[in-house]
């Protein structure tokens, strides 16, 4: 790889023992400076690494070089020339690939002296996100973020190579498109040429990629930019990138096989990590029953067990009434967790469960000879052996329980399970835990407006056995839907799509979109279905989330070059911003009152 330019013969991370005795020219940023009186040491940094520069006291005209070096501020951009020498014995730095050599500087040119820094460049603790994002150009210079974006680049290239090697064509879809409600709010773009009309920015290329399947491009992909005007959180941004792909004449197994190959390829090529296949699979019903979540982290200990029937046989009126109230009682086993049966830890875990709506967290310890002690054990003495067998417990284990409405039990125990996994280090150093979740419900009740809404989106094919009944009995309809989950985070969703007008119109009817409304909103898709549309399906994988998990980061802001805050603001360029009145006039738009800020 040629990295030399007119200003530099080498990059900083390139200088090795083989260069000893050579004259080199380097350019980069002053990372750290140490003045030892007769010698000044400066760590010079660029994207490729560090190298140590040495300035030595000299007489005559060269004496000015030391004084010039003393004026350098951190993050100043400089160019130096000098000779590569071996470091003195005992001064080598084994942490650096350049740690056995240094460059004795013979000339220094200050290309741009830095102003006082708004925050320390080493470490991230104590520097708020707002300040980091306001000076994002400095934040991105950090070696950790530089490596993060190198990984992102390699991953994107790896995805392109893998997919093109399997017959996929990369095809771009429009950024200015028709508004077709798909769940989240759209970002709208007013048309100057057609006053009063608007484009929408794409929430996803969903309809375009289905049109591409109807157009005969049987294997499509793109690294697609997607925009959604929704409330933000650590793993959500208003604009994100997804590895979007679609295939014709496939079923779920074809998509699973391709995506598993893609993921193992990316982890191997980018990180050198081997990922075993096939990935485990759970239906939505199994995931909710065993882990209380449709995105379970398989690393965080055992699955839940049902204790409802055992509760009926207890001596507690409270527990005996669980099933009669239409509620659930589930338990979770902590292997070798008996030492956690202290009031302090149980109270802390109870507070975690309360965040999910639980009114309490019950517990008991498992002792030798099949004995249960502590907590609620006295209510289960007569069925202790049944409880131990049900939980698959061993002496020294701790059992935790939550009772209540099913959704409360699931959410609360999931939070507790993840917290215990974090505290006990169950997730540390573990290989990636991929899992497929499939067989999702097609529809769910719309509690706010009544009726039904699509669980994922309304373009999903029902299971074959539900084709005749999905619109008559939406509550039981199951779709050919699937999510790929990694370490408790959803990486992407996909499905086998509806490819027939009659089925699509029936699906629209379920969510309250009649034939006329369907034609207005989605007529172009329905017309494409009229001309021999093939069976097709695919998936959209969140590239940002993939990189976040690959690099061990906890926020998407650390893997997107120029992200927004959790209030959808970019502090660096101060957007969103006001627009000149004359531009609004051109668009026929008037602002009548300020939009109230969200609390």
Image (spheres, helix red, strand yellow):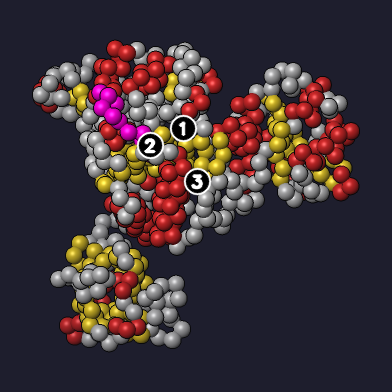
Residue denoted by label 1: 480
* Camera-side residue of 551 and 77: 551
Percent position of residue 2, x then y = 22, 70
Give residue 189's mark.
none
Residue at x 43% of width, y 52% of height: 261
- Say if the magenta span includes residue 531: yes
Q: Which residues are magenta?
A: 527-539
Circle nearer the N terminus (2, 1): 1
Percent position of residue 504, x then y = 36, 22
User: Callout 2 environment at 10 Å: few (<14), some (14 to 19), or many (20+)?
Assistant: many
* Camera-side residue of 180 and 321: 180
Is residue 503 at all visible to an observer of this figure?
A: yes
Secondary element at image label 1: loop
Q: Quadrant of the N terminus?
A: bottom left
Give residue 537's mark.
2
Q: CA distance from mark 3 to mark 2?
A: 21 Å
* Camera-side residue of 540 and 447: 540
């Amino acid at each position: 790889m040629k990295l030399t330019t007119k200003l530099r013969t080498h990059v900083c991370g390139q200088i090795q023992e083989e260069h000893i005795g050579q004259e080199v020219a380097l350019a980069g940023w002053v990372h750290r400076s140490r003045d030892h009186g007769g010698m000044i040491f400066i760590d010079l940094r660029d994207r490729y690494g560090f190298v140590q520069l040495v300035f030595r006291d000299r007489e005559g005209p060269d004496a000015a070089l030391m004084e010039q070096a003393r004026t350098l501020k951190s993050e100043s951009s400089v160019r130096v020339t000098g000779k590569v020498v071996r470091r003195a014995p005992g001064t080598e730095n084994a942490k650096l690939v350049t740690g056995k050599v240094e460059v004795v500087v013979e000339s220094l040119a200050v290309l741009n002296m830095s102003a006082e820094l708004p925050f320390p460049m080493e470490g991230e603790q104590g520097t708020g996100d707002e300040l980091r994002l306001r000076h994002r150009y400095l934040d991105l210079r950090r070696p950790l973020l530089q490596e993060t974006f190198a990984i992102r680049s390699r991953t994107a290239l790896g995805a392109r190579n893998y997919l093109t090697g399997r017959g996929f064509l990369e095809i771009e879809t429009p950024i200015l498109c028709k508004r077709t409600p798909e769940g989240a709010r759209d970002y709208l773009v007013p048309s100057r040429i057609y006053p009063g009309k608007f484009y929408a920015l794409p929430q996803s290329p969903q309809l375009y990629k289905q049109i591409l399947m109807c157009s005969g491009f049987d294997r499509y992909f793109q690294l697609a930019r997607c925009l959604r005007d929704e409330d933000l959180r650590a793993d959500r941004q208003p604009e994100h990138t997804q590895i979007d792909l679609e295939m014709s004449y496939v079923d779920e197994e074809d998509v699973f096989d391709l995506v598993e190959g893609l993921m193992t390829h990316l982890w191997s090529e980018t990180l050198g990590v081997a990922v075993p296949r096939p990935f485990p699979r759970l239906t939505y019903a199994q995931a909710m029953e065993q882990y209380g979540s449709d995105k379970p982290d398989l690393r965080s200990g055992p699955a839940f067990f049902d204790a409802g029937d055992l509760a009926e046989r207890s001596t507690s009126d409270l527990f005996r009434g669980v099933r009669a109230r239409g509620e659930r009682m589930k338990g979770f086993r902590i292997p070798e967790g008996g030492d956690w049966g202290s009031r302090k830890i149980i109270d802390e875990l109870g507070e975690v469960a309360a965040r999910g709506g639980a009114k309490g967290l019950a517990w008991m310890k498992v002792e030798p000879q099949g004995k249960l002690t502590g907590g609620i054990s006295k209510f289960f003495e007569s069925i202790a052996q049944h409880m131990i067998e049900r939980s698959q417990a061993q002496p020294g284990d701790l059992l935790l329980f939550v009772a209540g409405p099913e959704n409360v039990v699931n959410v609360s125990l999931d939070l507790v399970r993840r917290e215990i996994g974090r505290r006990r280090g169950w997730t540390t150093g573990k290989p990636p835990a991929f899992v497929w979740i499939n067989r999702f419900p097609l529809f769910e009740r719309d509690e706010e407006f009544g009726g039904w809404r699509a669980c994922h989106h309304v373009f999903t094919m029902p299971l074959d056995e539900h084709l005749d009944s999905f619109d008559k009995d939406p509550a039981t309809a199951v779709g050919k839907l699937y999510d790929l989950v990694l370490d408790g985070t959803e990486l992407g969703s996909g499905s086998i799509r509806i490819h027939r007008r009659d089925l699509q119109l029936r699906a629209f009817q379920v969510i309250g979109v009649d034939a006329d409304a369907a034609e207005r909103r989605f007529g172009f898709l329905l017309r494409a279905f009229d001309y021999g549309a093939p069976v097709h399906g695919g998936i959209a994988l969140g590239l940002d989330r993939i990189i976040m998990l690959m690099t061990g980061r906890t926020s998407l802001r650390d893997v997107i070059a120029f992200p927004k805050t959790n209030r959808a603001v970019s502090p660096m360029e101060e957007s969103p911003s006001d627009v000149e009145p004359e531009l609004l006039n051109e668009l026929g738009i008037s602002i009548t009152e300020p939009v109230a800020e969200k609390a």
